[in-house]
Protein backbone atom coordinates (compact mmCIF):
# COMPACT_ATOMS: atom_id res chain seq x y z
CA UNK A 1 0.00 0.00 0.00
CA UNK A 2 1.46 3.32 -1.07
CA UNK A 3 0.61 6.83 0.07
CA UNK A 4 -0.30 8.67 -3.13
CA UNK A 5 -1.31 12.07 -1.75
CA UNK A 6 -0.87 14.12 1.42
CA UNK A 7 -2.64 17.38 2.20
CA UNK A 8 -1.52 19.51 5.15
CA UNK A 9 -3.94 22.02 6.71
CA UNK A 10 -2.01 24.15 9.23
CA UNK A 11 -3.85 25.65 12.20
CA UNK A 12 -2.83 28.28 14.71
CA UNK A 13 -3.52 26.60 18.05
CA UNK A 14 -1.38 26.10 21.12
CA UNK A 15 -0.32 22.47 20.62
CA UNK A 16 -2.18 21.43 17.49
CA UNK A 17 -0.11 22.46 14.47
CA UNK A 18 -1.97 20.89 11.53
CA UNK A 19 -4.60 18.49 10.30
CA UNK A 20 -3.46 16.06 7.64
CA UNK A 21 -5.31 14.01 5.04
CA UNK A 22 -3.62 11.08 3.33
CA UNK A 23 -4.70 9.06 0.31
CA UNK A 24 -3.49 5.50 -0.19
CA UNK A 25 -3.32 3.83 -3.60
CA UNK A 26 -5.48 6.64 -5.03
CA UNK A 27 -8.52 4.88 -3.56
CA UNK A 28 -8.61 5.15 0.27
CA UNK A 29 -8.56 8.37 2.32
CA UNK A 30 -7.81 8.97 6.01
CA UNK A 31 -8.71 12.42 7.36
CA UNK A 32 -8.17 14.18 10.69
CA UNK A 33 -4.65 12.96 11.32
CA UNK A 34 -3.10 15.57 13.64
CA UNK A 35 0.38 16.99 14.01
CA UNK A 36 0.79 17.93 17.66
CA UNK A 37 3.62 19.76 19.41
CA UNK A 38 4.22 17.66 22.53
CA UNK A 39 6.73 17.89 25.34
CA UNK A 40 9.40 16.11 23.26
CA UNK A 41 8.59 17.71 19.90
CA UNK A 42 6.18 17.12 17.05
CA UNK A 43 4.28 13.86 16.78
CA UNK A 44 1.55 12.39 14.59
CA UNK A 45 -1.77 11.42 16.19
CA UNK A 46 -4.12 9.18 14.26
CA UNK A 47 -7.82 10.06 14.06
CA UNK A 48 -9.63 9.06 17.23
CA UNK A 49 -13.03 9.09 18.86
CA UNK A 50 -13.91 9.73 22.49
CA UNK A 51 -15.67 6.76 24.04
CA UNK A 52 -18.38 6.86 26.68
CA UNK A 53 -15.81 6.03 29.37
CA UNK A 54 -13.81 9.15 28.46
CA UNK A 55 -10.94 7.34 26.75
CA UNK A 56 -9.90 8.13 23.20
CA UNK A 57 -9.66 5.22 20.77
CA UNK A 58 -7.97 5.40 17.35
CA UNK A 59 -10.46 4.81 14.55
CA UNK A 60 -7.79 4.34 11.88
CA UNK A 61 -4.15 3.42 12.46
CA UNK A 62 -1.28 1.40 10.99
CA UNK A 63 -1.02 -2.19 12.17
CA UNK A 64 2.76 -2.34 12.36
CA UNK A 65 5.71 -0.10 13.22
CA UNK A 66 7.08 -0.14 9.66
CA UNK A 67 3.90 1.37 8.20
CA UNK A 68 3.58 3.85 11.08
CA UNK A 69 7.13 5.12 10.44
CA UNK A 70 6.50 5.38 6.70
CA UNK A 71 3.32 7.42 7.27
CA UNK A 72 4.94 9.65 9.89
CA UNK A 73 8.04 10.29 7.76
CA UNK A 74 5.96 11.28 4.74
CA UNK A 75 3.64 13.47 6.81
CA UNK A 76 6.53 15.31 8.47
CA UNK A 77 8.30 15.78 5.11
CA UNK A 78 5.15 17.32 3.60
CA UNK A 79 4.44 19.40 6.71
CA UNK A 80 7.94 20.93 6.77
CA UNK A 81 7.85 21.58 3.01
CA UNK A 82 4.44 23.24 3.32
CA UNK A 83 5.49 25.40 6.27
CA UNK A 84 8.74 26.52 4.63
CA UNK A 85 6.91 27.48 1.43
CA UNK A 86 3.93 29.30 2.93
CA UNK A 87 4.23 30.16 6.64
CA UNK A 88 1.46 32.75 6.25
CA UNK A 89 -0.98 29.99 5.27
CA UNK A 90 -1.73 29.10 8.89
CA UNK A 91 -5.47 29.17 9.52
CA UNK A 92 -6.80 30.31 12.90
CA UNK A 93 -9.39 27.95 14.29
Image: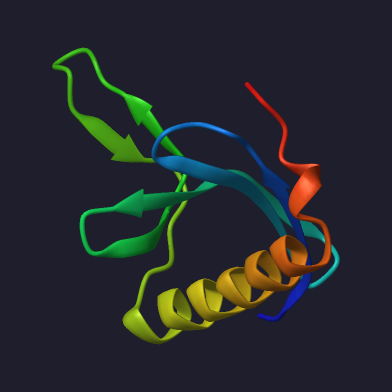
Residue 12: image location, x then y, percent: 58, 34
Left of 36 or right of it: where is 2?
right
Q: Is residue 18 above or below residue 23?
A: above
Q: Total number of numbered labels?
A: 0
Q: Is residue 77 above or below residue 84?
A: below
Q: Residue furthest front?
A: 88
Residue sitting at 74 percent across and 54 percent down? Answer: 87
Residue sitting at 62 percent across and 37 percent down? Answer: 11
Left of 77 or right of it: where is 25?
right
Q: Residue furthest bottom?
A: 66
Residue sitting at 26 percent across and 32 percent down? Answer: 56
Quick one: quadrant of the C terminus?
top right
Residue 49: image location, x then y, percent: 38, 28
Left of 84 or right of it: where is 47?
left
Q: Is residue 82 above or below residue 50?
A: below
Left of 79 or right of it: where is 54?
left
Residue sitting at 66 percent across and 80 percent down? Answer: 1
Residue 59: image location, x then y, percent: 43, 41
Residue 61: quarter of image: bottom left
In this view, the residue in front, 86 or 63, is 86
Residue 83: image location, x then y, percent: 70, 61
By what rule are the colours in the image chosen?
rainbow
Q: Residue furthest left?
A: 53
Amino acid sequence: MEITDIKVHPVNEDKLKAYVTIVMDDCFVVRDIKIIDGTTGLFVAMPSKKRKDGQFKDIAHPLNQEMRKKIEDMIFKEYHAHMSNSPQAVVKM
